[in-house]
Amino acid sequence: MSYVVWMEIEPPTTECARCKLLEAKIVSLEATVESLAKTVKELTKKLEEATRSKKRQAAPFRKSNSQKKPKDLHRKSGRKAGHPVASKLIPETVDRIIDVPVNQCPDCNVDLKDIRVEEQFQTEIPEIKPIITKFVIGIGTCPCCGNRVQASHPEQTSQALGAANHSMGPNAIGIASQLKYQLGMPFRKITNFFSSTFNLDFSPGGIVRATQSLAAKATGLVSALRMQLPTQKVVHVDETGWWVGGDRKYLHVFCTKNIVLFKVGDRSNETAIEVLGKCFSNTLCCDGYAGYDLFKTSRCNAHPLRRVRDLMEAMPKKYSDLQRIRDLLAYGMHLSKTRQDMPPSNYAKLVREHETALGDWIESHLDDKRTEAARLAKHLNKYRVEFSKHLFDPEIPSTNNYAERTLRGAVLLRKVGCCNRTEAGVKAFEILSSLWATFEKRGMHFTEWIKDRLTGLGPKYVPVDLLPANFPYKIQLNC
């Protein structure tokens, strides 16, 4: 026989030290979990915003709320109030005149009074009819050397016969080149445009081969421009992603106020060395890319400024600290633009004060460990002299915006034309895009040069307007 004994045990009256420690630890862990959950929620929201932003290609939808201006600060459409009148000038020559009289009111059927006459002009494109030229070419064999001799005419753009005996004329090649390499239209759309507008039937492959042949004949122009580039005091450079046959490459642009050169290569400094040469000793205006450290550079202030703004959004607790460096960078950019509005002594004093304040912020954040502010301070300290060059030389800009704007057309072309498939396409793009941009900056007509290059007999030379002033020699192009 078993017995069960019930005993009532009173709870301990004194608190256990271990229990107190565990309870405190539980409270701490709960606070940590709550903080981490909040962080995960914020990061998830940012990830979703970043994922959606990749699918938004056009402004203003790509701008974040912090980047958008308030509606009351938006610039009104049109030019500023008080601007001079701008309208199309009256044509000097008129091809035809049409009288448009009026005598009666169309509603009341009574004669009008106080009749006056006004003039209106209309400019129209005439109906385009293709001109097809047939060349009857003589071919013979020399009885002395046995060589085959084929006659040529100044208007011929190609010497091909047989299955390739129908070629594009110089005007058609010039327009196709402009549509592709300046306006970014794909080759298949160019064929549709020619067919609907000019009643010309060309295949995409035919246009590709014609533009590649043009690029081969224009190689000498690019060589003449590349020869001048190392002599420029300031060269602006930037790069963007590019694809060649599915392989990742980078498109580099090297530009001055009247020279533009595009080059497709990798991300290393080998591309810059190939274009500028190892002995390039002038200033290279670029972003924060370390590949240009081989040269004497001037760094873009807008890039760290955007970086600071992003950090201010991501780390609100550090807002006041980051606001200081943001104001310093913005003030430096503003100071260089106002150098002409003050005496040189006052400007020099403000520059020294700005340099001191910027150096103090950098020094105070270099010792921070594993923080974004410390990484920013190290970057600013590494290129401290390069970030301030615009304050001492008026020809050096504070940002790399000029190269970015020059590269913008290629970025748009990348979205539409999907870069290049072959190395031959890369070469054609580099040459023709460079020449179209250079001719445009110099106010020259590339289509006129194309017509002159593809037609006519005798040697061809680099245009004098593409050479340095007072250049004593002519540069002949290869046939």
Image (tube, rainbow, N blue to C red):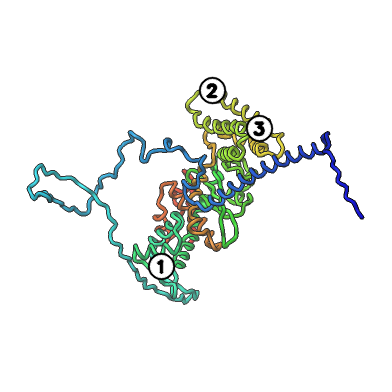
The disc, 3 or 2, on the residue closer to the chain's N-terminal end is 2
Q: Please state which of residues 50 and 126 is positioned toward the viewer in this rendering.
A: 50
For residue 362, the mark is 3
* Amino acid type of the residue that numbered disc 3 sits on in the rendered structure: Ile
Residue 202: mark: 1
Give the Cα separation between the discs numbered 3 and 1: 61 Å
Q: Does the residue at mark 3 contact the one at mark 2 (Cβ under 8 Å)?
A: no
The answer to whether any part of residue 279 appears in the image is: no
Q: Residue at x 66, y 39 (%)?
A: 372
Figure check: 251 above or below 210: above
SS at mark 2 in the image:
helix
In the displayed structure, would residue 339 be above or below residue 199? above
Question: Looking at the rendered structure, which numbered label has been put on residue 346?
Answer: 2
Marks 3/2: CA–CA distance? 25 Å
- x and y percentages locating residue 103 in the rendered image: 10, 49
Residue 134, by quadrant, is bottom left
| Residue 9 coordinates in the image, percent (x, y) | 85, 41
Badge 1 marks a residue whose secondary structure is loop
Q: Nearer the viewer, residue 407 or 67?
A: 67
| Numbered badge on residue 149 | none
- 33, 156: nearer the viewer: 33
Contact (CB < 8 A) between labels 3 and 1? no
Amino acid at pointer 1: Phe
Residue at the front extreme, as displayed: 1
